Image: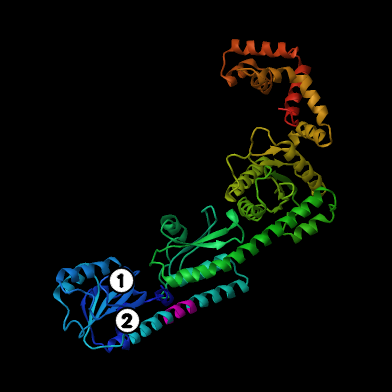
Amino acid sequence: MGPEAKIEAEITVRRALELPALRRGLPEVLAGGDRLDRTVRWVHAGEVPHIASLLKGGELLLTTGLGLGTRPSEQRAFIRKLADREIAALVVELGSRFESLPSALVEAARDCGLPLIQLHREVPYVTVTEAIHTEIINSHYALLRRADEILRRCTDVLLRGGGAPEVLRLLAVFTGNPLCLEAPDGSPLYAAGPESDDDGGPADADPLLAWEGLRDTGVRIDVPGGGHGPDAVRARLVLLPVNSPVAPVHRIAAERAADLLAVVMLQSRQEEVLAARGRGDFLADLAEGRISAAEAPAQARLLGFRPGAEPVLPVVMRLPAGLPTPGSWALLAQALREELAAPGVPVLLGVRPVEGRVPMLVALRAGQDRAALADRIAEALRAGVVRAGLDRPTAHRPVVVVGAPGDWAAAGPGLRHAAEAAAAAQGLPDQPWYDARRLDIELLLWRMREHGEQAVLTDFVERAIGPLLAHDRGARQPLLPTLEAYLASAGRKAETARDLNVNRQTLYDRLARIAQLLGTDLDDPQTVLGLRLALRARRHTDKP
């Protein structure tokens, strides 16, 4: 631990006795000699018997003994009350009341562990008070100077291009303990530990392990968010007492650094979201044809995407409405970018907050399997959403759609197709990712709704399955799940019965009832096709 870690904000009883103002009184320690390192918070002088009730704790009490009482029982009670108040020490000046302190007083102080000092010569109490208070104030100034020094060093690091991890490392060296920066939900963002000793000794253990073990006992400092409610705290700085307790100077330095970290995190998030939106604007312009295939590669290189001669794979993730708050897009963009680094392929990722989309282009290496790469990309995207704290149990899961690979001429149309397919796929049974090429019917129905054909779709659904829907609204045993299972199994009745966990006769009875309600033949291919379309179209209508 460096010398900074030993700086305290207050002086001790031992240090007070070394000051000339008290030393001139020839102090003699009669009890509590092993507790002279107690902190002196303040100095108080008084002569009343009930003086303990006037103290808050941590005081060095000066008295001539007039209020100590005359009987041993009174003297012992006086000491016990002071000890209960946890004062730092009792200093009694001899001469006015006592020639030497009574044995009852000394024994009680020893029993209570209270430092008891007698002064053999008279000293002006005002001089003692002034000297100790000056020492306390000077120690506070020294503490603040050390805190200012570490803040200046942190500022210098940031001006040279450093970030939050570098600030944490400086604080860890200063405190001699590991630190962790937590997100508001308690998850770790960055962690740092003290560097190895000057003599080449080994560095401390992984600071994340220390955080996991001591997070509940650590000292937490809020990093302000500048808002109210959930936005009031941007993060929390946790000081972990691994090598030594957290000293006052460490807390003050951390509180000052917290304001600096707030600015750093705000700036980094703004830069991240601006960069992510810039990439999203490029991908949107490419999808809408505002950037030509000839211009696209050069602009993509400026954004850090260099797929070479390999084909590019368009991918779009659509988030449920209202899932990311405006302030969480930067955190999401950073989490996705870091998670997508794991597959080890070039990725150009952007965000489109207004549409709730995350478009991207992924380089598909020669011989690389599209489905396997799509699996890895989808897994990374879902992990990024969880890491950003947006995986809410009550919300639908994000929809990931993967388009067809192609050159830059096909990249724009592929992104547009994937984006529309992602909108059309909302509400489908959950899958890790959807193939845009297999969503054409969903996309056709979605486009009809988007182009004002909602009434056409509603009429079609009503004609095809309206009587069945009406039956189910008032039935104890709805029949629509049976029809859905029957069509999903391509009319294989044995498989349908297994999926529904019913016997065949029950299934036959339900299918007969469905056919009767709809007035149709469930074995007719054209009828089956119409029912399939009606079930899909129902998702794109407002009618339940």
Q: Is residue 196 visible?
A: no
SS for dot 1: loop
> Residue 308: which quarter of the image?
bottom right
Q: Disc 1 designates what residue? A: 87
For the N terminus, give its image quadrant: bottom left
191 falls in the magenta region: no
Q: How many other residues sit within 10 Å of disc 1, few (<14), some (14-19) or many (≥20)?
A: many
Q: Position of residue 237 (x, y in %)?
A: 51, 62
Amino acid at dot 2: Ala
* Image mark count: 2
Residue located at (50% from left, 68% from top) = 254
Magenta region, residue range: 138-145
Q: Is residue 256 visible?
A: yes
Q: Earlier in the sequence, mark 1 or mark 2?
A: 2
Q: Disc 2 designates what residue? A: 16
Q: Position of residue 386 (x, y in %)?
A: 58, 47
Amino acid at dot 1: Ile
Residue located at (77% from left, 24% from top) = 461
Above or below, 427 against 164 in this view is above
Q: Report the magenta stretch's main SS.
A: helix
